[in-house]
Image (tube, rainbow, N blue to C red):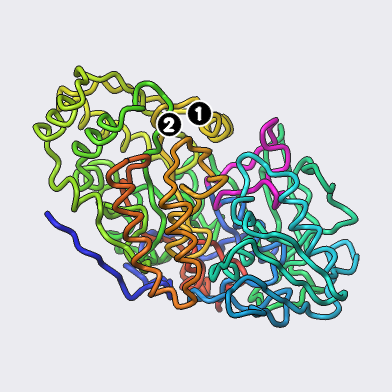
């Protein structure tokens, strides 16, 4: 099996209807007319994450969905497509040919939700603050190439970069560069709780219980100036402990739309249903799932162990048995649909083979079965995660070469413990910060990588990534990422497993659902309205 480079004509991310599904009342979002979104995401205030909605700390798709609606960035991704458009800025452009200086001019009259004026000083403060806090599990790596921020006037901001970076506009379109009020947020410390003071299209009010958000209400911000045009006055987010109860709420008309996280059996059922009332929309996605290895852990420090795992894993069976074919096997960190994708793991290892894996271990004088513990989070990536890890465990142990155990851990503990190197092998998901191959390589292997991985490869971090960032035309950068993918397939610091699709289940009287997700899989609630 030799999977060559495949690039799909995607990233417009227009969700297409699959089939009508589920019955129920058309009175979704009862009580006030708000568009009601159901989710299984959890937002908790913990010691390791005291302010889940602080842009200096938040770095997961659920929290970013909140931040995109409540904060402004200088640029943001458009309704569809991959090129950022102006939001808090009126214009932004590189000021030199080397892509080392980036200049933005703010819109005049911007205000935060507390009435304070938003100026270039707030932009500088926000960037400097995120870098100063340097939160362990936060998005600071997206800002690591900034050398300094200059503010020539109240409306002008100049970013001086340490090295050329054609992807910089994409990076400051993420919540990592969200603009916070310098009079409200601490300069070198995170806030506490769930309070948000931003200038985005919505203001936020939350209801909490035991340090956890139980309800979030987004109200249209009348002072907002930017590129978003809300099609509603209010959005409510309701939180469910599991996908089953969330689906029931959709059928009963208590919510209008759900996206995170639908289980494979729900998707299969909705595809085949014939009742009217709810549409299931599907589109290509860039979400990826992978195993991360702590290459300092004695059990997987030897590259041969990691290569043997790579040789054994049957992704086709995993997608079938763990996810009911609702996602696709993935053979590289850079998913299909992204420039530079190539199936490096398939090209190196071919079909799954216990004999080849045994030869790899024998050549390294490693005695089998090798004891291994696989850790996953049981409350963050959906209920199918446990089933998938059981299938993965069965594949490894079935070869006779591994003695694998699995353990599920709550996300609140899982993420900080993984970053501290507690787990030898653990499952992670990745939604792109922005749709560019850089964002599937640099965050894992660049300086201050978000995994806090001990694995280092100077060719990737010091040559291939910097060279790729000099390419303003991103197609020309593909060769650098293809080389990086081949290195990763040989060293196996991470092991790609599957690539997700985007699904939204929405009631038939809701408009704009085809634009509900952008090219980075982020929810765009301002696109949603209610038809007659």
Determine the CA span between mark 2 and mark 1.
6 Å
Q: Earlier in the sequence, mark 2 or mark 1?
A: 2
- Residue 513 as seen in the image, left or right of residue 90: left
Q: Is residue 403 magenta?
A: no
- Establish if 81 lies above or below 405: below
- Residue 368 as seen in the image, left or right of residue 266: left
- Residue 268 as seen in the image, left or right of residue 385: left
Residue at left offset 32%, top offset 34%? 389
The residue tagged with tag 2: helix, strand or loop?
loop
In which quadrant will I find the C terminus? bottom right
> Dot 1 corresponds to which residue?
421
The label number, if any, that marks residue 294 in the structure image: 2
Residue 309: name its quadrant. top left
Mark yes or no: residue 413 visible. yes
Residue 188: name its quadrant. top right
The residue lying toward the viewer, choosing from 475 and 390, is: 475
Residue at left offset 19%, top offset 42%? 314
- Residue 137 as seen in the image, left or right of residue 329: right
Mark 2 near mark 1, Cβ–Cβ under 8 Å?
A: yes
The residue stretch that appears in magenta: 40-61
Q: Around disc 1, counting alpha carbons within 10 Å, would you say few (fewer than 14), some (14 to 19), or many (20 or more)?
A: some
């Amino acid at each position: 099996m030799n999977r060559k480079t495949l690039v799909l004509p995607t990233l417009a991310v227009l969700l297409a209807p699959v089939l009508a599904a589920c019955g129920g009342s058309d009175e979704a979002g009862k009580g006030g007319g708000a568009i009601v979104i159901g989710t299984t995401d959890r937002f908790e205030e913990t010691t390791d994450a005291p302010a889940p909605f602080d842009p200096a700390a938040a770095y997961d798709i659920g929290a970013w969905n909140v931040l995109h609606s409540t904060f402004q960035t200088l640029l943001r991704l458009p309704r569809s497509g991959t090129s950022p458009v102006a939001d808090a800025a009126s214009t932004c452009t590189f000021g030199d040919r080397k892509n080392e200086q980036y200049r933005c001019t703010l819109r005049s009259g911007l205000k935060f939700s507390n009435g304070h004026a938003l100026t270039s000083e707030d932009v500088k403060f926000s960037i400097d603050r995120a870098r100063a806090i340097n939160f362990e599990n936060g998005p600071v790596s997206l800002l690591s190439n900034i050398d300094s921020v200059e503010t020539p006037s109240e409306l002008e901001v100049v970013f001086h970069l340490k090295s050329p970076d054609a992807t910089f506009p994409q990076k400051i379109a993420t919540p990592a560069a969200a603009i916070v009020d310098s009079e409200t947020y601490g300069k070198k410390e995170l806030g506490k709780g769930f309070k948000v003071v931003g200038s985005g299209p919505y203001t936020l009010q939350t209801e909490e219980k035991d340090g956890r958000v139980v309800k979030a209400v987004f109200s249209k911000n009348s002072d907002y100036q930017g590129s978003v045009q809300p099609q509603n006055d209010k959005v409510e987010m309701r939180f469910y402990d599991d996908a089953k109860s969330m689906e029931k709420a959709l059928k009963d008309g208590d919510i209008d739309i759900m996206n995170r996280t639908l289980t494979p059996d729900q998707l299969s059922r909705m595809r085949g249903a014939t009742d009217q009332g709810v549409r299931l929309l599907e589109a290509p996605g860039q979400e990826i799932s992978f195993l991360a290895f702590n290459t300092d852990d004695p059990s997987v420090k030897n590259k041969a162990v990691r290569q043997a795992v790579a040789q054994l894993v049957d992704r086709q069976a995993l997608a079938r048995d763990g996810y009911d074919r609702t996602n696709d096997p993935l053979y590289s960190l850079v998913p299909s649909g992204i420039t530079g994708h190539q199936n490096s793991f398939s090209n190196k290892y071919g079909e799954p083979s216990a004999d080849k894996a045994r030869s790899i271990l024998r050549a390294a004088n490693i005695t089998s079965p090798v004891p291994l513990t696989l850790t996953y989070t049981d409350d963050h990536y959906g209920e199918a995660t446990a089933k998938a890890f059981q299938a993965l465990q069965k594949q490894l142990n079935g070869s006779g070469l591994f003695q694998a155990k699995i353990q599920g851990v709550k996300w609140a503990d899982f993420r900080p413990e993984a970053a501290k190197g507690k787990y030898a092998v653990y499952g992670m998901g990745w939604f792109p910060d922005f749709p560019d191959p850089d964002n599937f390589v640099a965050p894992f292997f660049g300086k201050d990588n978000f995994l806090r991985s001990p694995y280092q490869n100077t060719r990737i971090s010091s040559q291939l990534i910097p060279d790729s960032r000099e390419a303003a035309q991103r197609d020309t950068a593909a060769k650098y990422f293809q080389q990086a993918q081949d290195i990763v397939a040989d060293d196996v610091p991470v092991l790609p497993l599957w690539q997700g699709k985007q699904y939204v289940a929405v009631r038939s009287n809701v408009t704009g659902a085809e634009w509900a997700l952008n090219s980075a899989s982020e929810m765009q609630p301002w696109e949603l309205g209610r038809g007659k």
